[in-house]
Amino acid sequence: MKKIGMKKPGMKTLLDGKGVERVLSRLTHEIIEKNKGAGQIVLVGIASGGIPLSQVIRGKIRVIEGVDVPTGFVDISLYRDDLACAGYRVRMKRTEIPFSIDDKKVILVDDVLYTGRTIRAAMDALIDFGRPRNIQLAVLIDRGHRELPIRADFVGRNVPTSRSETVVVRVEGTPEEWTVLLKEAPPGKGGE
């Protein structure tokens, strides 16, 4: 039986469970501070890695502010512009936003910010649900290599990477078991 969080050869640990916890605590405080409280915000996790992260942030806001922030999630599969080009078949997941986002401050939550295409797709999906006052982005890891002019408002950790490296965020099990790993490029491999 493979234990969640076990490190494989060629993998470097960027954050362990306690590190993820500290980063999410800081992000939560930054979100509350920038928005002058939590009264007008809603959280929307991007499937799949952003969903558990948004739930943890929701719990932390509840403890700090005493506010139960509406939280949902969005599947961006149909809004991607790069999956068909890469040969992927679209597999629909579920989108669940059981509240109005009209005139709300929407905090999009994702695990890794890379090219920006996922975030663009998520913003397109959100607009189908209403007209938010603004959309802010919170990410656990920003690894660079943007292809679109998108930046995060709240960044857990900036991790410079090469295009041949991969950031693996494991958010299965309890938060103490969560890890963020950098899968190193095989020897002799350059960028993509």
Image (cartoon, rainbow, N blue to C red):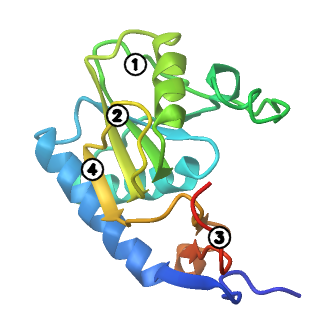
Residue 183 image-quadrant placement: bottom right
Q: Quadrant of the N terminus?
A: bottom right
Q: Which of the numbered marks, if any, corresponds to residue 189?
A: 3
- In the rendered view, would you say 35 is above or below 29? above
CA distance separating discs 1 and 2: 21 Å
Numbered disc in front, either 2 or 4:
2
Residue 166 placed where, x, y %? 59, 64
- Numbered disc 3: secondary structure: loop
Residue 182 placed where, x, y %? 55, 74
Q: Which of the numbered marks, if any, corresponds to residue 154?
A: 4
Whether residue 112 can be seen here = yes
How many residues crowd mark 3 within 10 Å: few (<14), some (14–19), many (20+)? few
Task: Say which residue appears at 28% left-offset and 58% top-offset.
Answer: 27
Numbered disc in front, either 4 or 3:
3
CA distance separating discs 4 and 3: 32 Å
Numbered disc in front, either 3 or 1:
3
CA distance separating discs 2 and 4: 12 Å
- In the rendered view, would you say 166 is above or below 118? below
Residue marked by disc 1:
101
- Numbered disc 4: secondary structure: strand
Residue marked by disc 2:
150
Whether residue 179 can be seen here = no
Q: Amino acid at mark 1?
A: Ile
Q: Quadrant of the C terminus?
A: bottom right
Left or right of residue 134, residue 17 in this image: right
Q: Amino acid at mark 4?
A: Phe
Task: Say which residue appears at 62% left-offset and 73% top-offset.
Answer: 185
